[in-house]
Amino acid sequence: MNVLSQTSAAEHSLEEGARGAKAPHVHLKGVTRIYPAVANNPEVHALASTDLDLPQGSFFSLIGPSGCGKSTLLDIVAGLASPTEGTVMFEGKRIEGRPPEGVGVVFQEDSSFPWLTVWNNVAFGLRRKRIDKAEMAKRVDAILAFTGLSDFAQAYPAQLSGGMRQRVCIARTLVLQPRLILLDEPFGALDQQTRLLMGDELLRIWRETGATIMMITHSLDEAAMLADHVGVMSARPGKFIEIIETGWPRDRTSEIVSEARFGSITAHMWSLLREESQKAMKAR
């Protein structure tokens, strides 16, 4: 399903003719995932046939019941898992069995290394790539300034708040200059106020880097606030039951949560998810 699906085919064709057809930044066609039976456990059909096109520079959120295949889908796009069937493309190249260059992933768990300073945490990936020391220092210092962490460069993760540790993980991804950023419930362990502030930070990063973002969240508010489009998934095997266009301006902030339309969007999400969540609970 295309995130431009709310545009009529005729309008879409006219738009493409006006600006020249452009391949999507991320393209999924007929992607499925079935986990084979293990010991006495039956096979698990995690992901039904899924189509998705993400334009470059878009912000796409995934919501759905627990166990619906959201993380499976993200892992497939990241090259961390292979689909049972179907094709996954990034920048016109097929993703096959390993993370492609230009893709960065941030997980929910605090993945900072407690024995390294903030500076060395952020530099970790660059060292593995054997980046020149002068270039590495330049890029790390720039990213620390960009994410507001310069004053904590020599601090250790244990000395930071949860929100700041997650900012370190984001900085460690950004320093690699990804063109596609994948986030799996990155703010799930944070309180609501910190989540809103981190959401503002993520929107700023998205605007200033121009990266495409695909994010999993269980928070309807977070999905509605951050994304251009929200993909609502069914109970397992997961598939898109609707892709909602939020219609927010690109320069949005968390202030939009006070708008009446924000409540309408989240209410519509829940109307789609309520029955699917009940199905998922019964299937456990």
Image (cartoon, rainbow, N blue to C red):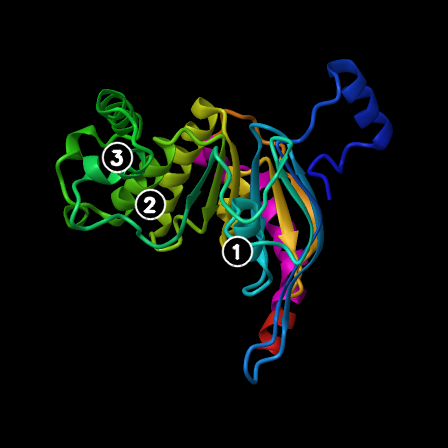
Mark 2 lies on residue: 194
- SS of the residue under disc 2: helix
Looking at this rendering, what residue extends furthest in the front direction?
A: 130
- SS of the residue under disc 3: helix
Residue sitting at x 38%, y 46%: 195
Q: Which disc, if any, is residue 71?
A: 1
- SS of the residue under disc 1: helix
Looking at this rendering, what residue extends furthest in the right direction?
A: 10
**Would you say residue 264 sits in the magenta stretch?**
yes
Visible residue check, residue 264:
no
Report the predominant secondary structure element of the magenta stretch: helix
Q: Position of residue 252 (x, y in %)?
A: 49, 29
Residue sitting at x 17%, y 33%: 153
Query: Would you place residue 237 above or below residue 211 in this image?
Result: below
Mark-to-mark CA distance, 2 and 1? 23 Å
Mark-to-mark CA distance, 3 and 2? 25 Å
